[in-house]
């Protein structure tokens, strides 16, 4: 299983971009990198996933390092609703393994 | 609406009693998962099932049991053998492939007194 390491917390101002890093040096060649976010007392919500190439969707962008040992989730313009715990996970045959996550605080 | 439903949202039990948490999905997903979350911590995998009538232990399976008799249902029993059962329990489902997203329920907060 891929073990992930993320900073405990990060802060941003509203309307500014946010770059959330994740190290996953033990990820295997076929494991996808997924990102989820969680609000207090709720289930996690899917954000984005990728394998090797950078990915974009309506919520965020995912930049994956060439050696796949790290990735960065990019929120292009943070809003107050983006304040949450962000989890980077490795997905092996659909099984997700979560780390401790990063608490993102967004200041108005 | 399609989704994954956990019930109840809050559950209280006396120490020494077994308790079963419900998880139902109508997304036609093959795989289902149970996670435990303690305050300020990440999610830890308890059990997962990739197909009906089959399931595997996760990282913290001791004191828990599951069944997968139907594709849409994956109940979790917290037994009296679980030494510290008070926690937030999350159920998820997905297709078996790693390149698809997982959907999570809203969780069940279990308090054992």
Image (cartoon, coloured by chain):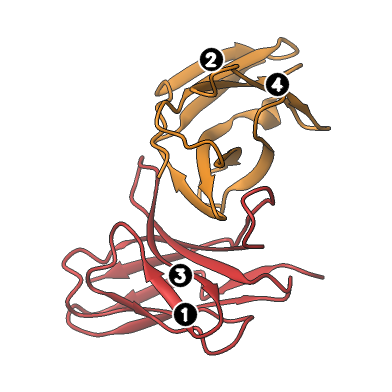
Measured in 3D between alpha carbons, the distance from the residue under mark 3 to the one under mark 2, in whole angstroms, is 32 Å
Q: Secondary structure at mark 1?
A: strand
Q: What color was chain B assigned in the picture? A: red
Q: Residue B54: which numbered mark, if any?
A: 1
- How many other residues sit within 10 Å of disc 2, few (<14), some (14-19) or many (≥20)? few
Asked if marks 2 and 1 touch (Cβ < 8 Å), the reply is no
> Can marks 3 and 2 be said to lie on one chain?
no
Q: Chain of mark 1?
A: B
Q: Residue B10: which numbered mark, if any?
A: 3
Single out the mark in the foreground, 4 or 2: 4
Q: Is A77 rendered above or below residue A57?
A: above
Q: What color was chain A assigned in the picture? A: orange
> Where is mark 2, residue-wise?
A11
Q: Chain of mark 4?
A: A
Q: Percent x, y for residue B47?
A: 40, 67
> Where is mark 4, residue-wise?
A75
Residue at image point 60% right, 29% down: A83
Q: Secondary structure at mark 3?
A: strand
**Image quarter of residue B79:** bottom left
Q: Secondary structure at mark 2?
A: strand
Residue at image point 42% right, 26% down: A25
Tally of numbered tags = 4
């Amino acid at each position: 299983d891929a073990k992930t390491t993320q900073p405990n917390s990060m802060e941003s101002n509203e309307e500014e971009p946010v770059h959330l890093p994740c190290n996953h040096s033990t990820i295997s060649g076929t494991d996808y990198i997924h990102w989820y976010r969680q609000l207090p007392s709720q289930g996690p919500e899917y954000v984005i996933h990728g394998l090797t190439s950078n990915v974009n969707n309506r919520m965020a962008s995912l930049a994956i390092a060439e050696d796949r040992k790290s990735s960065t989730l990019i929120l292009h313009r943070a809003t107050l609703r983006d304040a949450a715990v962000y989890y980077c996970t490795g997905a092996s045959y659909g099984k997700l393994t979560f780390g401790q996550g990063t608490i993102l605080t967004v200041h108005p | 609406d399609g989704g994954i439903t956990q019930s109840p949202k809050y559950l209280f039990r006396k120490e020494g009693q077994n308790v079963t948490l419900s998880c139902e999905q109508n997304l036609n997903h093959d795989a289902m998962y149970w996670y435990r979350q303690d305050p300020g911590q990440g999610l830890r995998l308890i059990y997962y099932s990739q197909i009906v009538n089959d399931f595997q232990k996760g990282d913290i399976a001791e004191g828990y049991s599951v069944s997968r008799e139907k594709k849409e249902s994956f109940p979790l029993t917290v037994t009296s053998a679980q030494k510290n059962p008070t926690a937030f329990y999350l159920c998820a489902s997905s297709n078996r492939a790693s390149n698809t997203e997982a959907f999570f329920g809203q969780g069940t907060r279990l308090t054992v007194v």
